[in-house]
Image (spheres, coloured by chain):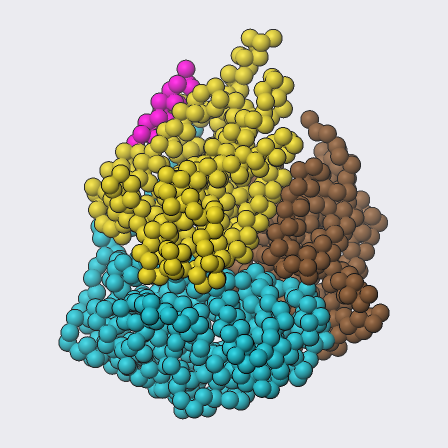
């Protein structure tokens, strides 16, 4: 059956990508580049997470950066409390609190003395927030554009609050001057091999794990919701719960990516929750291919990589933004399924199959096929 | 089918090209890691050319490059040319960190010149501290930092306020309304202002912070009308300055009775709001474009010649300009020795330079700079009339408001 | 008493500026379902048109308003023809494409007109305050208020009384059927997009003398405008007007009682809650779909 066949190709692609990013340090072991590519891979994780909620379930979350930023702050808070105390106040009070005349560590900072708590918070807080927001939206059958606008508004509100509450959050500067994360006797310095592998490992787990989920019945239901929400509802499925699952899981992954980002950037900043970044995630996902986790991850890596290097070349110093804007428009207009659809087309050509199967998604097709058979069984 | 395949090939070729443009490090091994060739001193220039703060940082980039060009034209440093590597950090702290890493680790620059906001400086700090590089920061800032890897050439609160606030109290009265943008610099300046006011027996009748980029001041102005202060003490930055001044006048307030006293309003913002809206308000800064000195005339003329007759210089672009000369003198002093960032830092201490604002000197105690604070009254023509000027250069005192904390060459100490 | 009056005037002024900026957005979104993230940049282009005209020809603000309308409408028309037109079947993708447009427009302006803040002259006769009911009110803010009402009236007449408006309403209700009646839907869409862009241009030209002119002046405005549009719903102009009035008054009041950050956060939060329970906006009868 074509389905298993295309699945084999797909899996090959995913595994190949994972192998490449894992052997990468052996080709090029250099502090600076490890750090640089670790950063791009984190964007890959973030973009894959969005693909799971947007491409697979049809929830366009324009506030993905909320989860990312909250994860980043959770990690930064834990690291801040371990900073060598010369820049901090009495009793290890973070420097910016001293500057804002805070006398004692606020209660919600206390548990961050524990790394374990911080890691759970970095995952749990974004997930909890997403769950509550998702419950609120999906129970009310909010879809499409309105989901986009609500999530965007939430992003703006949370960003405003973080910038405003300078005494507790470091305000516009964010949380800076951090110590190095250590776990199980391994230090995760921003430029180290260990950090790179932590990031690359995360991306592999997210991609392969995500792929696995999309193959389960649960994954198929999610895709069916994307294609026709009401139809799934008529089958008696609790659509809102499934949507909320995808939304919350995606937020958790984004939160984890945020924690890694703090390790790699060595600070947390409210710009990690900016509208700019949030829209960029959507763009990466769209350029790579929203309907494919690998495509979305590649999109992020490719776009940020091209952007970084384009802006570094003296020729494009002034015009790199123009070029990036033009690329977005061209991809959206002419490659609605992203660059990965080229690869899929290529695979099909390689297999000497006729090009009659057009843009429709194989997996989506499979989902609908499954449903049709289900309907037959149930009726 | 054929055409599909051809399209596919075309597209893949394009994708391949994009990849190789995107990741030159992979195909040209160590392309960006080449060391500086002999006869050149490589420095990184890190001012945003895109994004929000490009509004001001573009002019800093220009002033900095102009100084480098002048130095190179005059024979460079001990015969070596300064080679600037210009990057665009796009007004985004994360991009600042990325580009700083590239300049420090990739290009092996011996110093970086850059940035405007505190947030971007904080993002660059971990990079320059870990790799012992040197960051030259030209902007006035909150004075609460004591990094061993930064040379601060902008004003700190004591330099802007210690003469200004008493002068305001004497001339206008004791009731102050504090308004600032919502980040560390305005909050810290206001902390200092409150301490000074307390000493002088003044009072704060209101304190308000608006989000960065805010442009709607009707509510703030109404509160000001309600509280009737003698002075509006403003640390609002960027485009908000323009909106605030315009809406102030449009609301019928009068600078003669209730002037705005600002630490952040420069010729740049006045050019954008129009002299009629700035007229009668005051700014305290070490540099004004109208300052009458041969060095300044030369600086302004050169800047206008190079970048256009309608360009203005301001109290941030002037330090961005003169700090390159201080860097040059420090490297010169090193002579034949290894030109490394820590050596440059030590050599820069006590360096004096005849800057457009007067003779500036780097304080060896804390790597901040002795400056010449002035009080200017904005004129209809967009320039400041200098009303008061300190008799001598004023010592930088980071952590001024915090007795017990002292900035030393070895970092911050608790006294 | 004067405090309350002051507060009402502040709220009205905020509301009129909000309405001015969101009117074009509401029309574009309401008729074609396009989320135009480049709307803020249309506002910015309007402001730069005034700057350009004043700098080179020394024009007064009023003639500049007219030129701004047509210049930005032309830009909008072009963008609709080249890009937006191909995406009517994929409304969410318009978010991405128009974001690309906004990036290009911003950087394009930065490269051609310069990165620094630009000066736009406020007409001298409007730059002071005038007493209204015993309260000092900015003459320019009154001017904006009046012009917003005029634009609103013009838009209403255009939609209600002209042949174009008739076609537009027909196309909005049912594109297929209106095509059968010989209405050129593509042309109607282009014109509507251009009209919405033109309104944004006028908005930019009008707020330029009160605020400041910079390449990224539109980014903040567009999100506020979105809140107005979704709260007002797409069904009628009245919804947008009411929504702008409510948001303006409420945020003016909150900013006075607390501060501008709190005001903004609370207003956005309120809109989120409202969309959840009235996704069609405050001025529409709730219809159940599907």
Instruction: Point out residue C76 in the picture as x, y percentages from the top left corner.
Output: 63, 54
Looking at the image, residue B248 sits to the left or right of residue A12; the answer is right
Looking at the image, residue B340 sits to the left or right of residue C64; the answer is left
Instruction: Point out residue B38 in the picture as x, y percentages from the top left corner.
Output: 17, 69
Q: Relative to the observer, which residue lies in front, A377 or B375?
A: B375
Where is residue B147, by image quadrant?
bottom left
Q: Relative to the observer, which residue lies in front, C42 or A272?
A: A272
Chain C colour is brown
Give the residue drawn at x 84%, y 49%.
Answer: C161
Instruction: Point out residue B101 in the picture as x, y percentages from the top left corner.
Output: 31, 57
Give the residue drawn at x 21%, y 43%.
Answer: A27
Q: How many marks?
A: 0
Chain A colour is yellow
Q: Which residues are magenta?
A: A1-17
Query: Compared with residue A7, is residue A108 higher up or lower down, i.e. above or below?
Result: below
Give the residue drawn at x 79%, y 48%.
Answer: C238
Give the residue drawn at x 72%, y 54%.
Answer: C250
Would residue C7 be visible to someone looking at this image? yes
Quadrant the N terminus of chain B occupies: top left
Quadrant the C terminus of chain B occupies: bottom left
Q: Main secondary structure of the magenta part?
A: helix
Where is residue B34, by image quadrant?
bottom left
Q: Relative to the observer, which residue lies in front, C168 or A154?
A: A154
Would residue C51 be visible to someone looking at this image? no
Instruction: Point out residue B333 in the picture as x, y percentages from the top left corner.
Output: 21, 80
Chain B colour is cyan
In reply to whether residue A11 is colored magenta, the answer given is: yes
In reply to whether residue B251 is colored magenta, the answer given is: no
């Amino acid at each position: 059956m074509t389905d298993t066949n295309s699945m084999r190709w797909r899996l090959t692609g995913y595994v190949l990508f994972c192998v490449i990013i894992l052997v990468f340090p052996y080709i090029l072991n250099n502090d600076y580049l490890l750090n640089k590519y670790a950063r791009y891979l984190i964007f890959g994780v973030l973009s894959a997470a969005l693909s799971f909620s947007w491409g697979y379930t049809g929830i366009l979350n324009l506030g993905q950066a909320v989860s990312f930023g909250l994860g980043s702050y959770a990690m930064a808070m834990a690291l801040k409390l371990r900073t060598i105390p010369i820049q901090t106040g009495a009793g290890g009070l973070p420097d910016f609190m001293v500057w804002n005349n805070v006398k004692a560590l606020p209660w919600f900072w206390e548990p961050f003395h524990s790394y374990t708590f911080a890691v759970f918070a970095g995952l749990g807080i974004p997930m909890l927030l997403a769950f509550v927001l998702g419950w609120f939206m999906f129970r009310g059958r909010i879809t499409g554009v309105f989901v986009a606008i609500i999530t965007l508004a939430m992003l703006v509100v949370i960003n405003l609050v973080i910038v405003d509450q300078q005494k507790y959050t470091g305000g516009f500067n964010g949380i800076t001057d951090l110590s190095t994360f250590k776990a199980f006797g391994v230090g995760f310095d921003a430029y180290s091999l260990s950090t790179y592998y932590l990031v690359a490992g995360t991306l592999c787990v997210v991609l392969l794990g995500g792929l696995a989920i999309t193959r389960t019945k649960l994954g198929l239901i999610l895709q069916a919701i994307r294609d026709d929400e009401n139809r799934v509802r008529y089958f008696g499925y609790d659509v809102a719960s499934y949507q909320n699952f995808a939304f919350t899981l995606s937020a958790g992954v984004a939160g984890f990516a945020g924690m890694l980002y703090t390790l790699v950037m060595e600070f947390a900043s409210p710009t990690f929750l900016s509208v700019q970044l949030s829209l960029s995630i959507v763009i990466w996902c769209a350029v790579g291919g929203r309907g494919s986790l690998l495509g979305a991850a590649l999109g992020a890596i490719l776009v940020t990589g091209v952007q970084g290097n384009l802006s570094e070349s003296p020729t494009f110093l002034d015009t790199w933004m123009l070029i990036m804007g033009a690329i977005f428009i061209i991809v959206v207009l002419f490659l609605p399924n992203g660059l990965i659809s080229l690869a899929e087309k290529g695979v099909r050509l390689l297999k000497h199959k006729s090009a009659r199967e057009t843009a429709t998604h194989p997996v989506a097709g499979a989902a609908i096929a499954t449903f049709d058979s289900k309907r037959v069984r149930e009726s | 089918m054929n055409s599909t395949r051809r399209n596919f090939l075309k597209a893949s070729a394009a994708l391949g090209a994009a990849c190789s443009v995107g990741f030159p490090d992979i195909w040209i091994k160590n392309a960006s890691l080449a060391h500086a060739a002999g006869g050149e001193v490589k420095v990184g220039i890190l001012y945003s050319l895109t994004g929000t703060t490009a509004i001001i940082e573009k002019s800093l980039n220009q002033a900095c490059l102009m100084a480098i060009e002048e130095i190179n034209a005059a024979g460079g440093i001990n015969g070596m040319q300064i080679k600037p590597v210009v990057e665009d950090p796009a007004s985004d702290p994360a991009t600042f960190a990325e580009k700083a890493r590239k300049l420090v680790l990739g290009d092996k620059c011996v110093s970086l010149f850059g940035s405007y906001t505190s947030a971007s400086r904080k993002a660059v700090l971990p990079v320059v501290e870990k790799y012992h590089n040197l960051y030259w920061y030209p902007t006035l800032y909150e004075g609460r930092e004591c990094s061993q890897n930064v040379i601060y050439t902008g004003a700190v609160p004591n330099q802007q306020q210690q003469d200004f606030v008493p002068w305001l109290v004497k001339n206008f009265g004791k009731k102050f309304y504090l308004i600032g943008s919502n980040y560390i610099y305005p909050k810290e300046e206001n902390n200092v202002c409150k301490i000074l006011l307390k000493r002088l027996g003044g009072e704060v009748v209101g304190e308000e912070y608006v989000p960065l980029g805010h442009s709607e001041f009707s509510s703030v102005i109404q509160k000001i009308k309600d509280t009737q202060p003698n002075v509006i003490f403003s640390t609002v930055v960027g485009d908000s300055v323009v909106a605030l001044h315009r809406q102030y006048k449009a609301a019928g307030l009068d600078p003669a009775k209730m002037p705005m006293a600002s630490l952040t309003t420069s010729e740049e913002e006045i050019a954008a709001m129009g002299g009629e809206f700035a007229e009668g308000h005051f700014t305290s800064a070490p540099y004004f474009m109208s300052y009458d000195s041969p060095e300044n005339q030369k600086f302004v003329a050169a800047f206008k010649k190079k970048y256009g007759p309608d360009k203005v210089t301001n109290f941030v672009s002037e330090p961005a300009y003169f700090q390159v000369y201080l860097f040059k003198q420090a490297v010169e002093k090193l002579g034949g020795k290894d030109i490394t960032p820590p050596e440059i830092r030590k050599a820069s201490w006590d360096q004096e330079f005849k800057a457009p604002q007067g003779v500036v000197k780097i304080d060896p105690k804390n790597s901040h700079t002795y400056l010449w604070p002035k009080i200017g009254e904005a004129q209809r023509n967009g320039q400041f009339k200098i009303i008061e000027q300190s008799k001598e250069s004023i010592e930088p005192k980071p952590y001024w408001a915090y007795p017990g904390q002292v900035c030393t060459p070895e970092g911050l100490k608790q006294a | 008493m004067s405090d309350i009056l002051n507060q009402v005037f502040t709220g009205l002024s905020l509301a009129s500026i909000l309405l001015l900026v969101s009117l074009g957005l509401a029309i574009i979104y309401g008729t074609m379902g396009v989320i135009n993230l480049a709307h803020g940049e249309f506002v910015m282009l309007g402001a730069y048109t005034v700057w350009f005209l004043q700098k080179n020809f020394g024009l007064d603000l009023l003639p500049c308003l007219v030129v701004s309308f047509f210049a930005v409408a032309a830009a909008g028309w072009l963008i609709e023809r080249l890009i937006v037109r191909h995406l009517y079947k994929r409304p969410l993708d318009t978010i991405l494409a128009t974001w690309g447009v906004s990036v290009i427009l911003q950087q394009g302006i930065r490269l051609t007109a310069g990165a620094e803040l630009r000066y736009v002259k406020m007409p001298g006769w409007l730059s002071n305050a005038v007493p209204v009911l015993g309260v000092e009110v900015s003459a320019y803010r009154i001017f904006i208020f009046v012009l917003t009402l005029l634009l609103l009236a013009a838009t209403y007449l255009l939609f209600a009384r002209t042949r174009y408006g008739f076609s537009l309403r027909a196309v909005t209700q049912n594109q297929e059927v209106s095509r059968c009646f010989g209405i050129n839907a593509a042309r109607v869409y282009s014109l509507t997009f251009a009209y919405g862009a033109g309104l944004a241009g006028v908005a930019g030209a009008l707020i330029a003398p009160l605020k400041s002119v910079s390449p990224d002046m539109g980014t903040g405005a567009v999100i506020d405008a979105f809140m107005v549009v979704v709260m007002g719903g797409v069904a009628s102009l009245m919804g947008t007007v009411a929504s702008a009035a409510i948001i303006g008054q409420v945020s003016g009041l909150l900013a006075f009682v607390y501060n501008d950050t709190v005001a903004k956060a609370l207003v956005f939060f309120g809109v989120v809650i409202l969309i959840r329970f009235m996704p069609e906006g405050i001025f529409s009868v709730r219809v159940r779909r599907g």
